[in-house]
Structures are given as structure tokens and as C-alpha cells.
Amino acid sequence: MISPALAALAALALAVPPALATEYTPEQVIDAFEGVLGPIRTHRPSHPKGICAAGHFQATAEGARLSVAPVFNGQRVNAIIRFGVAGGYTTASDVARSTRGLAFRLETAQVEQWDTASISAPIFSAPTPQALVEGLIARRPDPATGQPDPARVAAFVAANPATTLPGRWLAANNPPASWATTPYWGVNTFLFRGQDGQVRPARWVFEPRAGVARLTEEQMRTLGPDFLADELRRRVAAGRVEFDMVLVFPGPGDDLNNPTIAWPEDRPRAVVGPLTVTAVEAGPGGPCDPISYMNLDMEPGIAFSDDPTLHARAAPYAVSLTRRTRN
């Protein structure tokens, strides 16, 4: 059995996968994940434990000014939402020091769709495509012991110290007390074309209107591994759950194309609209299950930056989905 920490690291890596180096095919990328987690046939590799919800997004006037994308036209747009827990398996613990996920699909009245996914950490785990795959290969369990070779892992970390940064962030920040009380970062840069024709690079974060609340050490010991879904159901039944979508704009010298580097907190920001959660599925499954939730562009209003991670998501996600649907 793979350790929960290792499974969480692998799942975090797939949450926003980096670009494929030419020597790694999409199949090899998924093979690298399955080398750590085992065959993935019945659930999604990224945040496999989760729950479906419904709601809507409505851009503010500032959001409509900053993007000509149809989902930012100021009209209410329905959302198919999924909240998730990283960990590699559907039995991942709700009190684990791993990321939580917020993904949603917006669909306009004209059936124009925009999918996106964000995580509850401001940085990603691999600075290069090679580091992603080679890190997974280094952590592949030894058949004789069922555990990774410590020497291989240590050698990889020594050569790729940036890969330890997400783990340090998660160790310093207790897990969220609710799916509704954590920010969710997009970590990648997109290009937003405004009504004035100007193209502005930005990253986003979804900030909870309920405020940020994290588990105490006592709660981590006593709440158990499966409290998040019922907590969210109770919270939504008592009133709407809302997040402000905030665009964050880079300053001079900020790296637009490396999702392992967080931008400073004093960067200019704009609230572009609330995402509102109005209903949660009563049990597992629902309309969110067949959706992969890849970060999609909606040109010309929302376009990919040169961040190669954005251009490389579709192929490995398609391989993973095909393997699951063949089961």
C-alpha cells in the first residue's frame, strides 16, 4: 500500500499537470502516475474523492470590462461544480495535509462552455515537465519492499529542491475546516482581453466570502476522515456558499510561465464575480462525474499564456479518461 503522503504528492502533481517534454508521451505521463498509485480505472487521478454541486457565476461590471469572454458578460451563468480531496484514492482523508479542489463548468445560454480547476495551495509541485515525470519515477515503489527507494527519492529532491515547496506549504497550513472556507488558486497565468482591446496577463484565486477557517489540531484528531461532504450540505442548506473570483495581475519581474512560483501578495487585484453554490448532491455521483475539468481557454476573452502546462493538459487527461471508461 502506498503511503497517504506519497499518494497526496502524486495527486497534487496531476491537479495542474506541467507540459510534456518531447521524450514523454501522454501515455508515459499517466504510466508514471500509475507506477506510484497503481492502475487508475474507477476514479479520476486528481482529487478522486469529491462531491458534485450546482450553482452559478455572474461577472461584475469590472469582470465584464476585463474580459470579452461570454461567461463574463454580466449574465448569470449556470455552474456544474465539484469539490475534491487529493490523495490518490477515493478513501483519502478529509483531515489530511493535502490539497482540496474546486472545479466547475460554466455553460451559457448559447451552450458555450468554460471549464476550470483550482487547488487550495498557491504553488504547484513541479518546476519543469521533466521534474514531474522523473519525480514520479523516483517514487515508484520497489517491488521487493512496496516502498520507494529512499536513496532515489533523496537524489531526486537534491536535484530538484523546488519540488519540496508545496509540501512545506501544506505542513505550515492546517487543512481547511470546510470546502467553503479555503481559497482556491488557479496557479497558471491566463491572458484576459478586455472591452478596451487590451490583453492583461492574470492569475486567479477564489476567495471564500465565509472567510478562511482551518482545522485545529484537536479537530484533525477527532473529526474523522469523512466530514467535508455533510458539512457542506448543512452549510448550503442554511444559506448560499459564495466565493469571489479575483484576478491578480503581475508586477515587473513576476514569472508568468512557472506555476511553482507564487506572485507577491501585494499585486494589483480585481474582483470579477461571485461563484455561488446553491445545491449539493445528497450522495456520491452526479452531473460532475463525467467532466474532466481541464482549464480551457475561451478566446479571445480568455486565452492561454505561454505557460506550457496549459498547453499540455488535454492529452494526458484524455488518456486517463479513456483508461477509466474502458473499465
Image (tube, rainbow, N blue to C red):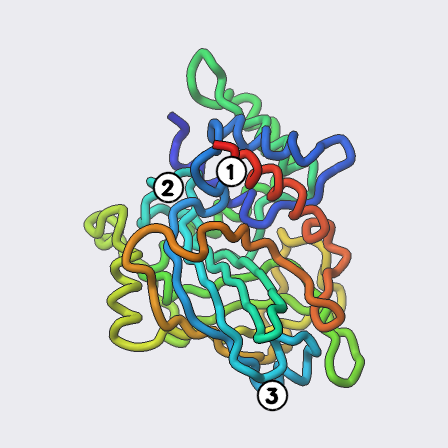
Q: Which residue is mark 1?
A: 325
Q: Label 2, label 3: how many angstroms apart (C-alpha)? A: 40 Å
Total number of numbered discs in the rendering: 3
Tell me if residue 274 comes above or below residue 324 in the rendering.
below
Q: Label 3, label 1: how many angstroms apart (C-alpha)? A: 41 Å
Q: Look at label 2 and name its amino acid.
A: Thr
Tell me if residue 237 comes above or below residue 81 in the rendering.
below
Q: Look at label 1 and name its amino acid.
A: Thr
Question: Circle 2 sits in a helix, a strand or a loop, which is it?
Answer: loop
Q: Which mark is residue 61?
A: 3
The answer to which of marks 3 and 1 sits earlier in the sequence is: 3
Q: Look at label 3 and name its amino acid.
A: Ala
Can residue 251 be seen here?
no
Question: Circle 1 sits in a helix, a strand or a loop, which is it?
Answer: helix
Residue at left offset 47%, top offset 31%? 37
Tell me if residue 234 comes above or below residue 318 in the rendering.
below
Label 2 packing within 10 angstroms: few (<14), some (14-19), many (20+): some
Q: Are marks 3 and 1 in contact (CB under 8 Å)?
A: no
Q: Which residue is mark 2?
A: 90
Q: Are marks 2 and 3 in contact (CB under 8 Å)?
A: no
